[in-house]
Amino acid sequence: MERNTRQRGAIRRAFQRTNRPLGTDEVLELARGEVNGLGIATVYRNIRTLVDEGWLDTVQLPGGSPRYELRGKGHHHHFHCSHCDRVFDVTSCSGSVHTMVPPGFVLERHLIVLGGLCAECAAIT
Amino acid sequence: MERNTRQRGAIRRAFQRTNRPLGTDEVLELARGEVNGLGIATVYRNIRTLVDEGWLDTVQLPGGSPRYELRGKGHHHHFHCSHCDRVFDVTSCSGSVHTMVPPGFVLERHLIVLGGLCAECAAIT
DNA sequence: GTCGTTGCAAAGCGTTTGCAGCCTA
DNA sequence: TAGGCTGCAAACGCTTTGCAACGAC
């Protein structure tokens, strides 16, 4: 049976407090604010557990380590800021991807990743 | 000055013969058909050289190692087959991604990855 | 007290680098 | 012949795993 340790609680709260996909390094940094000396292996193990039990979803963007976000957000995509490297949710979705499928191919899923500057970084630069 | 070795020639021909993005493992296998004993380090070094000189483009799909393809194909996207793990080009592009950008964000690029079964795998299953 | 969980360190795995010898120009 | 290129093996960075100690229930 699953136990509620300080470490797991801190990791859960890291996701609940920042409502965007987080990488393992971000989770480690955030959770270490609560639990000093938290090990990176514990972060990896808990993320895996939380994904397995359906509490987290894996967000795979091109060219980087996976990030994770709270499950149950419905269909959405992501915006990657090239300045701060953070990832944000994009709730609307252009539904016209079906027109792109070549003949004979069977479309099962699609992924759209936008890139550029987030509002914060766009305001600074 | 750059030299034309058997190894580099074999790697170039691997891309020219198969007109789709290739991973390092695919390149190694294809080029070893020509050059026995070809080392994986040579594949990595040559791919880097060919990308640097603009002969290859890097194709970064979510959740996997990068793949590479001949440069100069213009704007296009990719279809990843979940059965054979190969990647194919998709030439058409739904232009409606601009409507998805949140207020304040600056859109610089977008990436669309379709997933499902390629024509070949769809015919088998 | 049990046994799931943790931190540390070692092991894996794909990619990169150092180096001596090779081979293209 | 010079120096770019190659294959091998070691190094690297990130992730996973083994293990003894810890602590939630």
Image (cartoon, coloured by chain):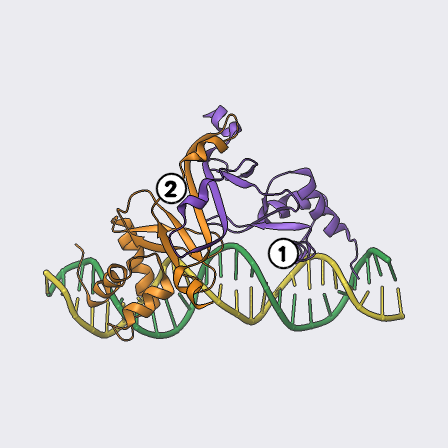
Chain colours: A orange, B purple, C green, D yellow
For the point 64% across and 38% down, the residue is B19
Residue B117, position as x, y percentages in the image: 47, 32
Q: Is residue B116 left or right of residue A69?
A: right
Query: Which residue: 44% across, 32% down?
Result: A98
Residue A63 visible in the current orientation: yes
Query: Image quarter for residue D15?
Result: bottom left
Question: Whole-percent x and y of residue B75?
Answer: 58, 43
What is the spatial separation of the Cα atoms under label 2 and label 1, in whole angstroms? Answer: 37 Å
The three-letter code of the residue at mark 1 reads Tyr
Location of residue A106 with respect to C17 vertically, above or below? above
Q: Residues within 10 Å of mark 2 (few under 14, many from 20)?
A: some
Give the residue drawn at x 51%, y 25%: A104
* Residue on which the image places disc 2: A93
Q: Nearer the viewer, residue D19 or B84?
A: B84
- Tell me the SS state at disc 2: loop
Mark 2 residue type: Cys
Quadrant for the N terminus of chain A, please: bottom left
**Compared to A53, does A108 lie above or below?**
above
Q: Residue furthest top?
A: B123
Q: Position of residue B92 (x, y in %)?
A: 54, 35
Q: Are marks 2 and 1 on the same chain?
A: no
Is residue B82 among the parts visible in the rendering? Answer: no
Report the residue marked by disc 1.
Answer: B44
Q: Residue B36's mark?
A: none
Label 1: element kind: helix
Indicate the position of residue A74 as horizontal and vertical percent values: 29, 43
Hey, which quadrant is residue B39 in on the image? bottom right
Q: Given the image, what chain letter belongs to the residue carrying mark 2? A: A
